[in-house]
Image (spheres, rainbow, N blue to C red):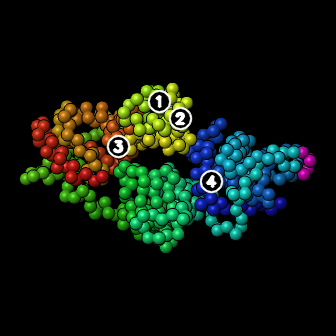
Amino acid sequence: MPAQQYFPLPPEMFALACETVSRRVSRLPFLRSGVRVTGELIGVAMECLNAEFNKTLALRTPPDAVEKPPDGLDRCIEERLKLPGKTVVPVIVDVLSSAGIAETTEIMDCGSHRSLNGIRLLPPWTWHAASPIVPTVRFQGSGSDDESSLVSWMSMCPVCRTGILNRIIGKQLFGIPHTDFYNECTSCGAKFIPVGTQFRLVSIATVRDPLWRKHLNMTFSAETWSALARGTNPGGNQHMRQTERKPVCQSRKSPSGGFMQMKDGSLIVPFQEKSLYFKPVKLIFSGSVREDAFVRVQKPLQVLLENPAFSHLLPRVNAKYSRYLSMKSGLFLGQLKERHDPFYREFLNPYGDEKYGTFRLGDSHEADKKGVLIVVVNKGIYHVVNCNDAFGVIINDVFGRISAEDCLLSGDGTRCRMNALLCNNRSASGVSVHQCEKEEERQHITEILKGFISI
């Protein structure tokens, strides 16, 4: 029997399938019944079904047949992914059916004349040999960069690395020349317009502090964007080489203009007729970053809505979510996010849905001193603090840890932003301090430095 021929899954359909599963079932990748459901598993299962004439496969290959029976979905997955089909098939069938990509059915085994449980790919999710030729579904580490670039380009946003890109047709972006389509990230809202055979990042809806602007208005090929999404260097790309060399050429100057950095890392900031020295302090991080901190809010939703900060949300809650009023607010918001209901974001400050970590000030002579503190990213100032309390208190108790309540609309957005900034960009960010006991002088320095803030 000739080997089965799999028509490669078009990248746009693959991206749409992953987004559909993420919206209707759970955000990919996720764990179900001990099976890790990934985009690769979704794509391979769809290719196996599409390869059949009637787009249908038995769930399991019939055992003990006189003649070799046609392979079922279990054996196809075992051969292509080296996973136990008996364990994987029930899970992938449930996921595809719940997402509306496939449906369960019954098929007749020609050898035994028995009815077998099967699964059929629904018509909107099928494709044919005349579809554009692209590589079979491949992912990180499963093939060459050239083969996987188109798939990775659509399946992983280079900006946030969490969403996927959908092609938007029939709409135009304000201030952007007319294009037949543009690609938009489902998570961060990044928008890419085609420029010949390349793509340009022109806007983003959600701020991902602080490096999301790095490639704004830059034009790369799909291969280069794919490499950026995977966190690897796209070898030989001229644009990328220039981007990598740029920080080296300006290693002693801040993007904010005029600041110098000494060999010990201290920043020299011009101030009136003198120079201020901001000394970097060591931050000790503990554990990894975690997301969805807001789900730990314990107040019942009804009590939370009594806060004036949420009063504008009360009519919508009463109209659509009144049965959840007695539920803990964090649990309620977590369920909304899991169901991809964007209403949960209305309860959070602009940085309330970031990934946070925990850190504290290392051994430092400045721990009990007062002064001006700056948060620095790539030698640019991103935040300035007039520390009326000691540096140790500000770093350890204000920025070093985030509570669930801080994430809410009534919480501290700046606190969330700085924690996420430092914890998610440890190699490029840091904290520097300038000791100053006089309140009037601290205020003056703070006001001056606010004019140099990068974002």
Helix, strand or loop at label 1? It is: helix
Residue at point 91%, 47% (across, down): 112
Who comes first in sequence, dot 4 or dot 2? 4
Q: Is residue 193 above or below residue 79?
A: below
Decide: few, some or many residues near mark 3? Use Cα within 10 Å; few <14, some 14-19, many ≥20: many
Residue at point 38%, 38% (across, down): 409
Q: Amino acid at mark 1?
A: Leu
Q: Is residue 306 above or below residue 163?
A: above
Q: Closer to us: mark 4 or mark 1?
A: 1
Residue at point 46%, 54% (across, down): 189
Res 446 quadrant in image: top left
Instruction: Say whether residue 242 is left or right of residue 379.
Output: right
Q: Amino acid at mark 4?
A: Ala
Q: Closer to us: mark 4 or mark 2?
A: 2
How far, Cα to Cα, is label 4 from label 3?
Answer: 33 Å
Q: Amino acid at mark 2?
A: Tyr
How far, Cα to Cα, is label 1 from label 2?
Answer: 10 Å
Q: Residue 417: which numbered mark, if any?
A: 3
The answer to whether marks 4 and 3 mark residues whose Cβ atoms lie closer than 8 Å is no
How far, Cα to Cα, is label 3 from label 1?
Answer: 25 Å
Residue at image mark 1: 301
Instruction: Say whether residue 260 is left or right of residue 177.
Output: left
The answer to whether marks 1 and 2 mark residues whose Cβ atoms lie closer than 8 Å is yes
Residue at image mark 4: 17
Decide: few, some or many residues near mark 1? Use Cα within 10 Å; few <14, some 14-19, many ≥20: many
Image coordinates for residue 384, horizontal then vertical, percent: 23, 44
Residue at image mark 2: 321
